[in-house]
Image (cartoon, rainbow, N blue to C red):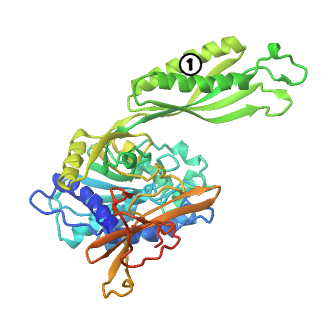
Amino acid sequence: MSYESRRFRTILLLAALSFASLELRAQSPGRVNGDRMLEHMAAMAGIGKDPGGGYARVAYTEADRQGREYVMGLMRAAGLTVSIDAAGNISGRRAGSEPGLQVLVIGSHIDSVPQGGNYDGVVGSLGASEVAQTLAEGHLALRHPLEVLIFQNEEGGLQGSRAISGELREEDLNQATRSGKTLREGIAFIGGDPEHLAAARRKPGDVFAYLELHIEQGGSLAAEKIDIGVVEGIVGNHRWDVTIEGVANHAGTTPMNQRHDALLAGAKFIEAVNRVVTSMPGRQVGTVGKIQVIPGAYNIVPGKVILGLDVRDLDEARIDLVFSKIRDEAQQIGQASGTKFSYQQVVGDRPALCDPRLRQLVTESAKQLNLTTKLLPSGATQDAQSMARLAPSGMIFIPSIGGHQSCPGGVFAAAGCGQRRECPAASGSAARCTEVVIYCRYQTIDGAKTGSCFREASSNRRFFCRGGRGRLRGICGGWGGWRWRGRWRCGCGITPSPCGPGRA
């Protein structure tokens, strides 16, 4: 088994151990099959692959439906009883040994953004199925029933998990989605029953605990060479449409000192957001990520601008404080420029703290497996945010190389690696060796993929690594790093070949 397969197996075992701490007591949690998990990941990567790069399993498209069929097949193979609820979420259940106990839930999502990465959501979904498969193969009984839950349309606003928590309303079903379908049409397309949406809702107390494995949405774990992120909570996310009204006028005939330029005021507002957010201690973030200029012509001083403001933090009070300071700055900008600012809140997601008992269980399980950990927040919204409204919830982050996970360059260190093949013996030697791809990395530059693979070859207990251009490197350590080590020889005469993600 390759280094990365062993690493991936260990990470999946962490998820199993976390549940073991809750459930199995004296039983061993078993050993998950990392190689099988990687095969399932590779198969999922073939569904909805975008010719332009990345993957496009956008919710309510044919690729999404094909991905759902694939994961339901895995769930059935794991001995789960599979069904689709009224909201279109996929549920796979396994009975517990003690009737009447609340259900333990694990899972994530498989839909993606356009040209997304293949590990966002998929790691948690297929990892949950693998845990169920391991329990079935080991004939391990849980006291509580186990449910693998695959949420629909996470990327379009947590629609599946919001239906379960009761936050998705009937009037929301007429919203348009990226697929071109409304929510109502999309839910019906994937096998749900939008006319009876309330049937998908669960009440506090229905779920004993929820745990989700997810790739980190950021690069801190990989940069610090930390194995596991123990998620402290999911940040609150507040968004506003900020409208700035000035006076539209002819760009050639209006003197500079007589203008009420809404776009110029908007530029100062954007700078003020950055200044306010960075001047305060803490982990809060603020972004202006959308801009609309009206009328939007070369020869007209902008009379109206609409900006999209996004503020996030794990503390709701801090979000309110940041927004208050931003409004104070905007008032001064408006007075100086003769413009008017107004605000319409469009999103008001509250923070959701992960349960401290689950955080402790994950930390202790990681310690048993000699995995390093770091406590950190999730800066992006997650299905766990909705589930935390119903039950104690926790999340496990795994490193994302380069911090990209919702784009074509998103690579988890184990993905596409762990492949073995026999390589020829060195000239004049009867020894044979095994070559293992242990690290693949690529990036997209102007639409073209560039990358390199690093291979480990062993012969007569000596190890060598070769880089993408034929240079020899030392044995890889950590999450794909490498170190120089003395003089190099290639004991098996390995010839490097071009490779991208998932290819030897």
* Residue 145 vs residue 66, the one in the foreground: 66
Name the residue rendered at 19%, 66% in the picture.
Answer: 30
Q: Horizontal and vertical percent for residue 376?
A: 34, 40
Q: Residue furthest right?
A: 253
Mark 1: which secondary structure? helix
Q: Residue at x 32, y 62 (%)?
A: 8
Instruction: Decide which of 159, 113 is in the foreground and name it.
Output: 113
Task: Give whichever of 402, 477 is nearer the camera.
Answer: 477
Side (left or right) of 135 relative to 265: left
The spot of residue 393 in percent (x, y) is: 30, 45
Residue furthest to the left? 26
For the N terminus, the quadrant is bottom left
Q: Identify which amino acid the numbered label 1 is placed on.
A: Arg
Residue 92 visible to an observer of this rendering:
no
Q: Position of residue 325 (x, y in %)?
A: 51, 18
Would residue 367 be found to the left or right of residue 498 on screen?
Answer: left
Q: Is residue 440 visible?
A: yes
Return the residue at label 1: 327
In the picture, measured across the screen, residue 450 lies left or right of residue 192, that is: right
Dot 1 crowding, Cα within 10 Å, few <14, some 14–19, many 20+? some
- On screen, 66 above or below 147? below
> Which quarter of the figure has residue 449?
bottom right
Residue at 62% in and 66% down: 51
Q: Which sits in the foreground, 264 or 121?
A: 264
